[in-house]
Image (cartoon, coloured by chain):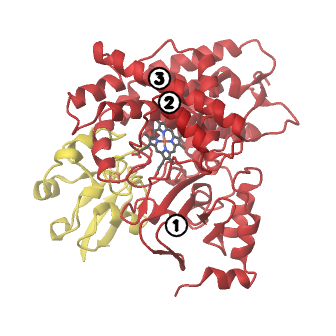
Amino acid sequence: MVQFTFIQPDGTRNTVYATPGMSVMETAQHNGIGGIIAECGGSMACATCHAYFDADTIAKIGASEGNEHEMLDFAATPRSEHSRLSCQVEVSEVLEGAEITIPDSQV
Amino acid sequence: MTENPQTRAAAGCPMEQASETFRPFEHQGMYEFLASVRGDVPIFFAPEIDYWVVTRRADIEKIMPDADRFSAELATQPVFPWPDSVGRYLEGRNFSNEAVQVACDPPRHTRIKKSAAQFLNIRQFMSYEDAIRDLVRGYIERMRGQEEIDLVEALTYELPAQVVFLLLGVTDFDPKKIKAWGDLRLHMIWGDPNEHDLDTAARDLADFWDYTVDLVEARKVSPQDDYPSKLLALRDGDDAVLTENEIKSLIFGLLIAGHETTTNAAGNLLLELLRRPNQWQAIVDDPSRAKNAVEEGLRYVTSVVAWRRQTKEPVTVSGIDLPKGAKVLLSLASANRDPAKFDEPEMFDIRRKNAQEHMAFGRGLHHCAGAPLARLELRIILEELTTAFPEMALVDDQSINFTRTLSFRGPNQILVRPCG
Ligand code: HEM
Ligand code: FES
């Protein structure tokens, strides 16, 4: 299991144990974390699973690329260099201790 | 463990009762029915239409994105097959519309979606905000000074069609044609039309196809900043990206996808709000509440109450074995009031925290490509109406009627007194 933390726009923190191989989006949904709406269920069509990853983590997992990079332009809350679509980030050891901030709005 | 539906039916169980009670085209009483069966009956057969109806959110959430096992190809096929004469007529009119989005499966869907999403996305839609607001204000100006109006006729019927035409780069579309072309279109596919209606509908459909073809041809000659021009540019003469007929079909499909869906969503939302003057007042007092009110409207009274899939292999849904080829009707209306997701689901509350977790726009690869646009339109309608007519009130003792279709629900008329 890998442990990381979701931070809500109001600062509320939820630390979860995640299963490697699942996506961060699935982990959020599995743990009832609000704010990761994920309307398209992970098929990269909605950009409602947008989240900001802390700088260290982004350095480790890499910035968004390709279709994901294009889709982030369409997120309801403006992207930053820390933005990823959480459905495209797979849980693995490198996420240990990560802090994942949920944007103000997804729709 | 799986159960044999016949054995259950023979036992006179709730599943059989649901089969007998369900009225697929009747919206009056639909929610009460769903609430009464959801607990015991996650799935039942509807003989009138030959579909399995799925009632629980957890199942629907799994089925919709599962393109490997559930095909979307039947999504826009007529519920009751048309007589050959309709097909012959349409052929004679060179009606060559083909399935391009909501009714096709990967890999075709994936290829086409890639292009469509270059235009149908939240950024693009937001660029129309001012234009949409101007349109809404125009309708509102025409309501002023009237004692009683029908909100559907005065605003919500036309507006979403005009917005689709904005995307198509058309700003001078004749509103009378919107009505003529729209009236029977949905009924023809999702209703139970008689032959006369079918003939008229087929003619309207072919007329609209001709309009689409002319529009795309015109954009080929002189491109503009709009959806057809964008698709033509992406195609750049390459059939492997998109064919010309696919582009025409995408344009044709957009009006069907974006018109009555949104008309009905607006009607449903306004009706529920006006039935609860304190919630209307809450938006008057603080228009920033409009956004969540839109979400609660989409949850509580969605305009697309049910959507279809067909099994590509034998599957088991909540213990019931379905063969390959089984037709499945996913009750989004039911999913949106599933107590497993929403506390006090039968209550309409614009302050509901997780309202936006509704399934009004489907789920998975086909998730509504116009969702951000629909949300924008609905929010602007609410903001502008509550500002212009804070005292608006429903006319007493009116009966609310819904057109009989399998998938679409919205009031045909909402009589209001704009100034209370
Ligand atoms: C409140 C209004 C609307 C509702 C409730 C709605 C609902 C839906 C639903 C249920 C689907 C099918 C989802 C699935 O199969 O999983 C869908 C697909 C679609 N909708 Fe909407 N819709 C609305 C407004 C619009 C608007 C305004 C547009 C565009 C102008 C639009 C364009 C589309 C398109 C293009 C698809 C097909 C997406 C695909 O298959 O990739 N919709 N919509
Ligand atoms: S869930 Fe839709 S893009 Fe990630």
Chain painted in yellow in the figure: A
Q: How many marks?
A: 3
Q: Residues within 10 Å of mark 2 (few under 14, many from 20)?
A: few
Q: Is residue B327 above or below residue B15?
A: above
- Horizontal and vertical percent for residue A105? 41, 44
* Marks 1 and 3 share the same chain: yes
**Residue tagged by mark 1?**
B326
Q: Amino acid at mark 2?
A: Gly
Instruction: Check the residue under mark 2 and report the chain it is in.
Output: B
The image shows residue A37 at horizontal and vertical percentages of: 41, 53
Q: Any atom of ligand 1 within 8 Å of the CB at mark 3?
A: no
- The hue used for chain B is red
The tag earlier along the polypeptide, 3 or 2, is: 2
**Secondary structure beneath disc 3?**
helix
Residue annotated with mark 3: B210
Residue tagged 2: B92
The amino acid sitting under disc 3 is: Asp
Which label's residue is closer to the chain start, 1 or 2? 2
How many residues crowd mark 1 within 10 Å: few (<14), some (14–19), many (20+)? some
Query: Splitting the image into 4 quarters, where does residue B382 fall?
Result: top right
Question: Distance from label 1 to label 3 (Cα)?
Answer: 35 Å
Q: In the image, what residue occupies the spot 72% across and 69% down?
A: B18
